[in-house]
Amino acid sequence: MNEFFIPRLGHTVWESVPRLGAATRLLLGGLGAVGNRHFSFRQWLREVYGLGVLSLALMIVAAFFTGMVLGFQGYYALVRFGATSALGTLIALSLLRELGPVLTALLFAGRAGSALTAEIGSMKATEQLAAMEMMAVNPLAWVVAPRLWGGIFAVPILCVIFDLVGIFGGYLVSVPVLGVDGGTFWGQMQSNVTLSGDILNGLLKALCFGLIVTWIAVWQGFSAKPTAEGVGAATTRSVVMASLAVLGLDFILTALLF
Amino acid sequence: MVEIRGLHFARGEHVVLDGIDLHVPRGAVIAVMGASGGGKTTLLNLVAGSLQGQRGQVLVAGKDTTSLSRAELYRLRQQMGMLFQHSALFTDLSAFENVAFPLRRHFRLPESLLQKLVLMKLEAVGLRGAAQLMPAELSGGMARRVALARAVIMDPLLILYDEPFTGLDPISVGIIASLIRRLNDALGASSIVVSHDVKETFAIADYGYILGGGKVIAEGSPDALRSSESPLAQQFLRGSPEGPVPFHYPAATTFAQDLGLQVNK
């Protein structure tokens, strides 16, 4: 092993501690700024629209195809054991417990998270954040809080829509195409999917993913170098870090919740 | 209005400001000039409380910006306006909404009153007719004027200008210079103008400071500065490539060595 590896690793960790501290302060400050007089409900609604509603088309298309693929792959596995009656359950559980929250968060990081980072990074590069500070308007309340809460609110709703559209896509492949009985498809699903164990835990995952993806996106925007290159690099980092964070957090949450 | 005493500011090893003293009386337009990288914008940021010096005092309206809490600093900033070098308009808001922004955030005014106040400021900078245009539809000079209207919408006691003439055509430069003086006098405010533009800045300033090497190398009225004996001040005011500020950035090797015409020893 390279003799410099340990010192370099130590240096990297040491260097990242203040950054992590600053990012945590931004997160707590942003979440707590809801009570600030500069927090705007209208601004929050705009963010919910920008982050959530404008991501809908992407989510619906992705969910539809994911559900249909699950139908084919699930059928392929189950038909060998004569268990195609469990196909509805397999599709629903796969989506509700895992694919729905994770894919929603990954797509959200790519579509909305990158846009958030680029927007805030550009605001920094063009001195808009500094101007806000000079006008005695706290950017935590005006810029960070509506976006953080917008992301936390939007991702679980997007996840619900993803799950529903995915299950519908799975149904279209399973019942009309592969010939699985419709009553069995829905009946098995209804018997085996639980509200707290499957649906709510999946939504809790989505909530955590929404928080972490939006946090990373906002932080990367705020800490971006105020140049075109800096904003581009921050946007890339935002998507990469958010995607890895979602997958890592998914493992932890799965281990804890299921 | 502003009193700076023995201000020292460094970034790591690099000393940006080294014991600066500066006085801005009420009602005056003060020019701060000097070569690029001389710490002029840093000085504005220190006055605004965005940066904090390692030593010295920055008193604005009698309050030391280095010892204020965030809430106190925000209260003080409501009495300040700042025009940024690149205007810093909010790109998602119209010219009208940009100017209205500080009012909307700090006061709950009836819409009719707010409209009158904003239109008055836009009229003062000659852009009432452009109120509904978006920043992307404004020329550089127009954007600077909208930003100026926004900077003075709260009738500040102190207005800070960071390179207000940079990148503007001569007509816009003249308009902005005239507005700086007129708005300062109309509001009874004090202004600090950081600029490279000697002619236009001297035309509107009551007093000026020239920074060099982190220190004040010359100060006085524009006439006094023109006759300053400091070689650095004279080089800056005349725009001469020869003088204490070298044309060439220091290099470790000679030009001939870099070209391979001379063997390194």
Image (cartoon, rainbow, N blue to C red):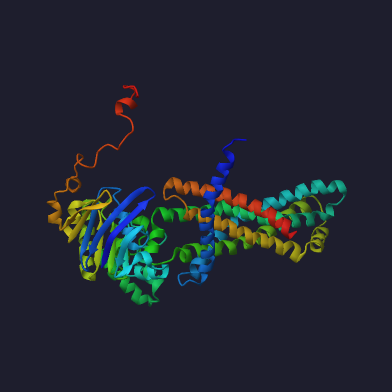
Q: Is residue A119 visible?
A: no
The image position of residue A184, as x and y in percent, is: 83, 59
**Residue closer to the observer: B102 or B3:** B3
Residue at left 54%, top 61%? A27
Q: Which quadrant holds the N terminus of chain A?
A: top right
Q: Is residue A174 visible?
A: yes
Position of A254 compared to A223: left or right?
A: right
The image position of residue B147, as x and y in percent, is: 32, 61
Residue at left 36%, top 62%? B49
Looking at this rendering, what residue extends furthest in the bottom direction? B110
Position of A202 compared to B229: left or right?
A: right
Position of A216 compared to A88: left or right?
A: left
**Residue closer to the observer: B3 or B40:** B3
Relative to residue B76, is residue B178 depicted above or below?
above
Residue at left 57%, top 48%? A240
Relative to residue A72, is residue A40 depicted above or below?
below
**Residue closer to the observer: A193 or A12:** A12
